[in-house]
Image (cartoon, rainbow, N blue to C red):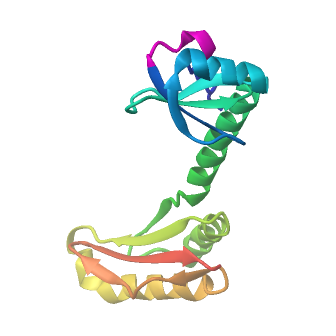
């Protein structure tokens, strides 16, 4: 896991003449840095510059340690959500003369991929004159689809593109 590094200007580090202050329990307004620091001191909080590019820059009245904790938490939650939403497509390759034992072996892998939440793309590759055995490739893919019915749903019927016939499966919800 990567270290999250956040840096914000706080209190006297803010170098703009006019700023907009926001925070809990106060009304948003434009004032000078000195006036904002006085308000922050009265409320026993810090003045944190959250948007330095704004016109005028936006500063928040909040406890700095609490603010950093919440920002790091937001970033971690976003990264976690992105990881969960990422779906990989795992590819299984077959030939038109794939034996039943090999099909069983690769079916177990496909089941594992589908239970992990990944999509599975089954490909039958025809080399040379094997393209004459299109029916064998289609039979292999349909047999695989039948074995994966309780774990995944086929997205389409077998398609032939060039010398490759493929079929994709998505996990059952």
Residue under the point 57% across and 89% down = 146
Q: Which residue is the extreme one toward the right?
A: 44
23 or 136: nearer the viewer: 23
Residue under the point 37% across and 76% down = 166
Q: Where 153 falls versus 31 (above or below)?
A: below
Q: Which residue is the extreme one toward the top?
A: 12
Q: Where 33 falls versus 154 (above or below)?
A: above
Picture coordinates of residue 59 (x, y %)?
Answer: 55, 29
169 or 86: nearer the viewer: 86
Picture coordinates of residue 4 (x, y %)?
Answer: 62, 27
Image side of residue 17 versus residue 131, left or right: right
Q: Within the magenta stretch, is there residue 13?
A: yes
Q: Where 39 falls versus 145 (above or below)?
A: above
Picture coordinates of residue 157 (x, y %)?
Answer: 39, 88
Picture coordinates of residue 102 (x, y %)?
Answer: 56, 70
Q: How many marks on residues? A: 0
Residue range highlighted in magenta: 11-17
85 or 63: nearer the viewer: 63
Locate the C terminus and report the quarter of the image it occupies: bottom right
Give the quadrant of residue 13.
Answer: top right
Locate the N terminus and report the quarter of the image it occupies: top right
Residue under the point 20% across and 73% down = 162
87 or 101: nearer the viewer: 87
Image side of residue 48 versus residue 127, left or right: right
Q: Within the magenta stretch, is there residue 79?
A: no
């Amino acid at each position: 896991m990567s270290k999250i590094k956040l840096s914000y200007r706080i209190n006297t580090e803010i170098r703009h003449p006019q700023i907009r202050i926001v925070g809990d329990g106060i009304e948003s307004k434009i004032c000078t840095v000195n006036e904002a620091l006085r308000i922050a001191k009265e409320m026993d909080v810090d003045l944190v510059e959250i948007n330095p590019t704004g016109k005028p820059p936006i500063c928040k009245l909040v406890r700095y340690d609490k603010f950093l904790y919440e920002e790091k938490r937001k970033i971690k939650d976003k990264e976690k959500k992105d990881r969960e939403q990422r779906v990989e497509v795992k590819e299984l390759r077959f030939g038109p003369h794939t034996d039943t034992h090999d099909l069983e072996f690769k079916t177990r892998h496909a089941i594992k991929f589908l239970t992990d939440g990944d999509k599975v793309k089954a490909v039958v590759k025809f080399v040379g004159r094997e393209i004459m055995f299109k029916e064998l490739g289609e039979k292999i893919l349909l047999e695989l689809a039948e074995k994966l019915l309780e774990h995944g749903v086929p997205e389409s019927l077998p398609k032939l593109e060039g010398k490759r016939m493929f079929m994709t499966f998505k996990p059952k919800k």
